[in-house]
């Protein structure tokens, strides 16, 4: 079970005093407020927080899907966005896996997975396919390569999507509630499969979720965000050693960490609820 | 077990559908024949008389020329509309400026039925043939533009973001996301457009008198299927009117069937589960 780590971890993320205001000259919705957060190379950082607090906004800023109002974000000491450069350029070093999934419906699984290397012109079709098939075999996806996404179950689609992201050799995976729509059994299979994949390819993982059990099972640390505008309220370090499997879920330490996280989240959820009541 | 049962049920369903269709068409034909024999159809000829007229036309070069002419006009108008419509639609998807300029003009012109363009087209275009082609073109053009535009604008932003995040360039996004993402609605637009094209070409032929390539051996049977109907009407051949109508039905059915096949072939990811 103890798979040796093959590749050197990379992908340190430094989020420095980031502010994100939507529509600054109009409604001025502040989604992220002076948020500072450091994520170590190869760390699994789980982000939890009340609905609508600004988690996706932070992820989109890292991914380069929109600009930030002030502050700076660095990846391995390279400035992604910051002073004089409000929006980072989206790139294959930070691949995003979306809340509802974004496999291209018009491409087969294999063509979806080889998309990144081919559009980047990084490898030939043959090389890309070879690599794709190797990764798919590891993820137990060998026999779906010529299916279209609509023909697959949602669990399989998620696994394909993670493989598609890994094909780009990213230093960071940005996951926005990727397992939200799954039933709990499929979800726990996904968790173990994600960890297995992670042990083979140590990338930094920035993972947004609402599911505390998921957060603690997967995370090296769990960042509890404040209600909108979001900034870290509490960082829980998960000191359960890797490799982990489902037995972790019943351990005492797991329960303690759950309690600790739960109370922080609960406070913020109440704050968000009260704010919602006021607005409504 | 369950699967075979459903399959069998489906197969049975299709078979009985065919039998049902045959029965219903057959009984209408018989009723029609009986009523015509009893002189109850107000001059509409009996199916057997229509069949006889059709049989004669099969050996008339003019009849086949009409098929050729109408099909040629439909094809010319339709393909021009397809190419220009898809290009304009895509350009409007990509460029906000172009969209802002074009869309209002478009919305004013669109409600004008193609047939209202007939007089203007005849005056404007140097030959009748070109006016007919133009009107046919208009029939399909708007539908294809609107479908392309709607399809392109409805592409989920997540696909674009996912592509960008995997290192795709803007050009890549256009080729690999916008084009395939728009294709299903283009094929829908094309199928609808093709239907309109047949409606329009027939009317245009009737109004314009069959176009420049009038003639053929069969005394006015060779100006297009629409003209064939009109000419049969003025000539008092009611059997031929019905033959013309049925011919158009068959032509429309064949062309949209062909188009549907092509659409399914081009979008293999649709409707496969
Ligand atoms: N494009 C936008 N323009 C204006 N406001 C926006 C925009 N996108 C998000 N917001 C607002 O910013 C706030 C944060 O949104 P965001 O999607 O980042 O929250 P979230 O934490 O990801 O929520 P959830 O848990 O529901 O996914 C919300 O109040 C939202 O309404
Ligand atoms: Mg979100």
Image (cartoon, coloured by chain):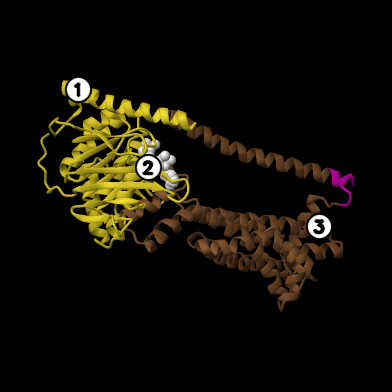
Chain colours: A yellow, B brown
- Residue at (83% x, 58% y) in the render: B238
x, y percent for residue A53: 36, 37
Q: Badge 1 sits on which subunit?
A: A
Quadrant position of the C terminus of chain B in the picture: top left
Chief secondary structure of the magenta span? loop
Badge 2: few (under 14), some or many (20 or more) residues near its Cα, within 10 Å?
Answer: many
Asked whether residue A273 is drawn in magenta, I would say no
For the magenta stretch, what is the residue range?
B35-43
x, y percent for residue B53: 78, 59
Q: CA distance from mark 2 to mark 1?
A: 31 Å
Badge 1: few (under 14), some or many (20 or more) residues near its Cα, within 10 Å?
Answer: few
Residue A256 — which label? 1
For disc 3, does the CB lie below 8 Å from ligand 1? no
Residue B239 — which label? 3
Relative height, residue B75 to residue A241 (above, below) = below
- Residue at (56% x, 61% y) in the render: B100
Residue A31 — which label? 2
In the displayed orientation, state which residue is furthest to the bottom: B126
């Amino acid at each position: 079970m103890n798979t040796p780590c093959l590749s050197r971890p990379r992908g340190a993320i430094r989020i420095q005093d980031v502010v994100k205001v939507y529509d600054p000259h109009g409604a001025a919705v502040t989604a992220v407020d002076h948020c500072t957060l450091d994520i170590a190379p190869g760390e699994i950082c789980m982000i939890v927080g009340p609905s609508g607090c600004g988690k996706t906004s932070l992820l989109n800023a890292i991914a380069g899907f929109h600009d930030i109002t002030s502050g700076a974000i660095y990846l391995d000491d390279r400035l992604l966005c910051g002073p004089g450069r409000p929006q980072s350029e989206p790139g294959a070093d930070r691949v995003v896996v979306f809340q509802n999934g974004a496999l291209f419906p018009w491409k087969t699984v294999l063509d979806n997975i080889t998309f990144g290397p081919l559009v980047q012109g990084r490898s030939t079709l043959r090389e890309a396919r070879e690599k794709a098939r190797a990764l798919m075999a590891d993820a137990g996806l060998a026999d779906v390569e010529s299916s279209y996404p609509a023909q697959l179950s949602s669990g399989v689609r998620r696994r394909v999507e993670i493989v598609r992201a890994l094909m780009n050799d990213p230093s960071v995976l940005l996951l926005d509630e990727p397992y939200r729509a799954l039933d709990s059994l499929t979800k726990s299979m996904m968790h173990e499969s994600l960890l297995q994949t992670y042990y083979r390819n140590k990338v930094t993982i920035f993972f947004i979720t609402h599911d505390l059990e998921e957060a603690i099972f997967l995370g090296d640390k769990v960042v509890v965000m404040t209600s909108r505008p979001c900034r870290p309220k509490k960082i829980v370090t998960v000191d359960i050693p890797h490799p982990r499997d489902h037995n972790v879920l019943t351990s005492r330490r797991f329960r303690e960490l759950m309690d600790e996280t739960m109370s922080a989240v609960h406070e913020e959820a109440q704050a968000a609820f009260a704010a919602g009541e006021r607005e409504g | 077990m369950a699967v075979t049962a459903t399959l069998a049920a489906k197969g049975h369903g299709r078979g009985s559908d065919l039998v049902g269709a045959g029965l219903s068409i057959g009984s209408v034909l018989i009723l029609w024949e009986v009523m015509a024999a009893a002189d109850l159809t107000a001059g509409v000829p009996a199916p057997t008389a229509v069949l006889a007229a059709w049989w004669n036309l099969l050996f008339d070069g003019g009849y086949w020329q009409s098929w050729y002419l109408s099909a040629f006009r439909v094809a010319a108008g339709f393909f021009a509309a397809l190419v220009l419509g898809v290009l304009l639609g895509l350009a409007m998807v990509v460029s906000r400026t172009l969209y802002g300029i074009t869309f209002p003009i478009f919305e004013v012109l669109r409600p004008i039925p193609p047939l209202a363009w007939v007089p203007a087209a005849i005056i404007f275009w140097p030959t009748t043939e070109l006016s007919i082609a133009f009107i046919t073109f208009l029939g399909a053009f708007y539908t294809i533009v609107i479908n392309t535009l709607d399809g392109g604008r409805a592409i989920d932003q997540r696909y674009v973001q996912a592509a960008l995040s995997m290192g795709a360039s803007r050009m890549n996004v256009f080729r690999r996301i916008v084009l395939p993402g728009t294709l299903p609605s283009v094929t829908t637009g094309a199928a609808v457009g093709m239907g309109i094209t047949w409606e329009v070409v027939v009317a245009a032929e009737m109004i314009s008198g069959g176009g420049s390539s009038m003639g053929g051996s069969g005394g006015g049977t060779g100006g297009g299927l629409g003209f064939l109907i009109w000419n049969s009407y003025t000539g008092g051949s009611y059997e031929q009117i019905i033959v013309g109508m049925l011919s158009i039905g068959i032509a429309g059915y064949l062309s949209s069937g062909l188009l549907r096949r092509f659409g399914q072939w081009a979008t293999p990811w649709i409707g496969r589960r």
